Amino acid sequence: MRRDNDNERTTDSAGAPSSAFELRFLGTGAADHDWARLGASDVRGSAGTLFGGRVLIDAGVTGLENLTRFGVDPAGLRAIVITHSHDDHFKPAVIAKILDLRGDGAERIDIYCTPQALEQLDAVLPAGMFQGHAIRSGDRFTVDEMRFTVLPANHALKDFSEEAFHYLIETPYGNILYALDGAWLTRRERLLIGDRQLRLIVWDATMEKAGDWRCFEHNDLAMIDLMMLSLRGTETVDEKTICVLNHIARTLWPEDAAEAEAIAAAHGYLLAHDGMRLELKSVRDGGRK
Ligand SMILES: [Zn+2]
Ligand SMILES: [Zn+2]
């Protein structure tokens, strides 16, 4: 198992400076979608989001289709960052296929995940095909212009000693909190975010309504409202902070997309959908495009 001594690592930037930063939501479903029917309008892919066209967060069951159906060339990926090893977020065989499609000439790819997940990758991927990084909460690493802080999430894996992560991603376009899966924010996570202002939060919004048994590992809208209220009190967020609801369960939100979007909008949030683009312009230029 590899583990760097340093708490902070840097992946060199090859990218030219750009005027905007794009997030592409490739898969926005919880694990209850029927992925044999992926492509149907009521089916959301397994979790996966592309940052700056180069960093893929999570590659689970539909990880490969998430790229191919939206025309994302695997050869353009610089890093894959894993939140946790549930198979709707992490599937070694799928990652092997993605890496295979990159071809021989592709630039080195870095994969960041728990030591346990890295062991699984090492078992299926030939050495030299990727650079693995075993991470734990509190670590920091940088890919291109994105500085990641690894945050501990309240989300349990079968092996309780394996962590699940959220990420704070600091970019020249503002700070992003990527918070799925996991219920609430943990105390330590809140401390690691500190006094940084958040421009965008991607929330685990598995459930629409309160009162569900999953609330000890996923959020509903009432929980997100309470967290936003608290974060507003400390000026961590303001009225311009964009909230995207993600990890949407098929059975816990209205089937009708317009109805679900209207519910999110009534709370001031955006409901993610597969293929959705969000562009952050330079903080100096102001505002979301
Ligand atoms: Zn999940
Ligand atoms: Zn999970």
Image: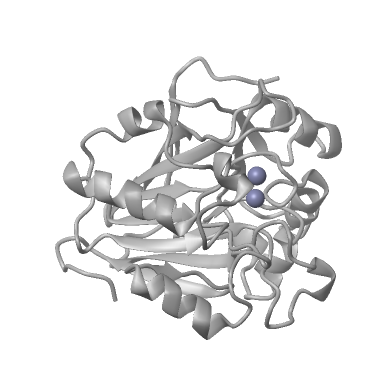
Residue at the front extreme, as displayed:
211
Q: Position of residue 168 (x, y in %)?
A: 39, 42
Location of residue 243 with respect to 43 vertically, above or below = above
Location of residue 63 with respect to 92 vertically, above or below = below
Residue at the (45%, 49%) spot, across then down: 178
Left/right placement of residue 48 relative to residue 261 reads right
Q: Position of residue 42 (x, y in %)?
A: 68, 79
Viewer-side residue, 235 vs 74: 235
Q: Position of residue 100 (x, y in %)?
A: 79, 54
Viewer-side residue, 243 vs 184: 184
Residue 106 visible in the snapshot: yes
The quarter holding residue 49 reads bottom right
Q: Position of residue 25 (x, y in %)?
A: 53, 66
Residue 53 visible in the snapshot: no
Location of residue 155 with respect to 64 vertically, above or below = above
Left/right placement of residue 120 relative to residue 70 reads right
The quarter holding residue 16 reads bottom left
Question: What scheme was used to colour the molecule?
Answer: one colour
Residue at the top extreme, as displayed:
5
Left/right placement of residue 97 relative to residue 171 reads right
Residue at the (50%, 67%) spot, across then down: 24
Viewer-side residue, 205 vs 103: 205
User: Which quarter of the rendering shows the C terminus?
Assistant: bottom left
- How many numbered circles does the render carry? 0
Viewer-side residue, 50 vs 41: 41
Residue at the (68%, 52%) spot, across then down: 59
User: Which quarter of the rendering shows the N terminus?
Assistant: top right
Residue at the (83%, 48%) spot, across then down: 93
